[in-house]
Image: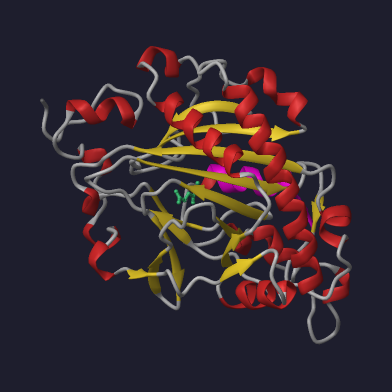
Amino acid sequence: MSSSMSTTKVLVSDLVSTVNHVPTNFIRPLDDRPNLQQVQSSDVSIPLIDLQGCDIIQNIRYACQNYGFFQVVNHGVPVSVIEKMMKVSKEFFHLPESERLKNYSDDPFKTTRLSTSFNVKTEKFANWRDFLRLHCHPIEHYIHEWPTNPPSFREDVAEYCREMRGLALRLLEEISESLGLKREHIVEKALGKHGQHMSINYYPVCPEPELTYGLPGHADPNVITILLQDDVSGLQVLKDGNWVAVNPIPNTFTVNIGDQIQVISNDRYKSVVHRAVVNCNKERISIPTFYCPSSDAVVGPAPQLTDNDHPPLYRNFTYNEYYNNFWNRGLSEETCLDTFKN
Ligand SMILES: O=C(O)CCC(=O)C(=O)O
């Protein structure tokens, strides 16, 4: 076993059995470490919204204005679809190295790729994460690129993606209404032909979780993110300067506002910084669905939300311009939004 040397393994999942310390390229400077003891638990503090309950619009407005995050129960996605998605994801990451590596690419603009960390081409520190990134809308444009091993991968993931799209569209209508816009405003006017991506994040057990991140603090560039987590904690959200752990609740999704809602809402809702930490006991899988505009869609503040007292805070831009900026810059707690301010 080597101790802290760099490694020739491409993926953390394969590196992990060859080291008993975190290799030096993963070690963060002292002032940029997770401080795992200082984290608050969120079972009560991140709003939990019952999508079959009362006052849904008011609850969404409250959560978006105060947290940028909420959890949803009674969301209508069948448990069997969720379970198959989680099972096939785990099976994929447990395939032999040579089989997984068939999907490897370090090009962030490839529409299907297995990769590691965040952007290995631009980042200074590596992150303790591997991920399979898939574009999934329109599904027929991309499904032929997806892995064929495990054999049920395409079918299980496609079914999950369709359910996620339905849930995303419903939530976007409710978010639109909560902003005082027409229900269909975001879905019909702001997203062009629409886009949907997903990442299957795999965080192996880490021998020294206090030295590194699964993913450091960042805000999401898209419209909304709907996150499925397995039963292992790791997601943390920045709230009033403190990190709050969003511990998994079975059959519940965690939803967050992305940068594009911040723009469309002209800063009424904020895209909030979050991160993933790792642990020394259990591997973890998280599966964010990133609902987004199509790359040619022009995004800007909704005219109905601007007036003399609330001038547009952002210029109009294409989502393509925004997305390139996000991937080329590297993950950072400073949002890309500043580049697009008026
Ligand atoms: O693993 C998590 O809980 C968070 C993942 C995330 O923030 C991302 O993939 O952008």
Q: Could one spot residue 109 in this view of the protein? A: no
Q: Could one spot residue 299 in this view of the protein? A: yes
Residue drawn at (70%, 64%) of the image: 52
Residue drawn at (81%, 42%) of the image: 296
Whether residue 218 is in magenta: the answer is: no
Quarter-of-image position of residue 143: top right
Judge by depth and name the residue closer to the eye, 154 or 185.
154
Quarter of the figure that contains the N terminus: top left
Left or right side of 316 for 126 = left
Magenta segment range? Answer: 316-328
Judge by depth and name the residue closer to the eye, 83 or 19.
83
Colour scheme: secondary structure
Q: How many marks?
A: 0
Judge by depth and name the residue closer to the eye, 276 or 317.
276
| Percent position of residue 183, x then y | 86, 65
Q: Is residue 59 above or below residue 166?
A: below
Q: Is residue 35 above or below residue 106?
A: below
| Percent position of residue 330, x then y | 48, 47
Judge by depth and name the residue closer to the eye, 333 or 172.
172
Left or right side of 205 for 342 = right
Whether residue 318 is in magenta: the answer is: yes
Q: Is residue 146 above or below residue 36?
A: above
Given the current orientation, which residue lies at the most extreme bottom position? Answer: 309
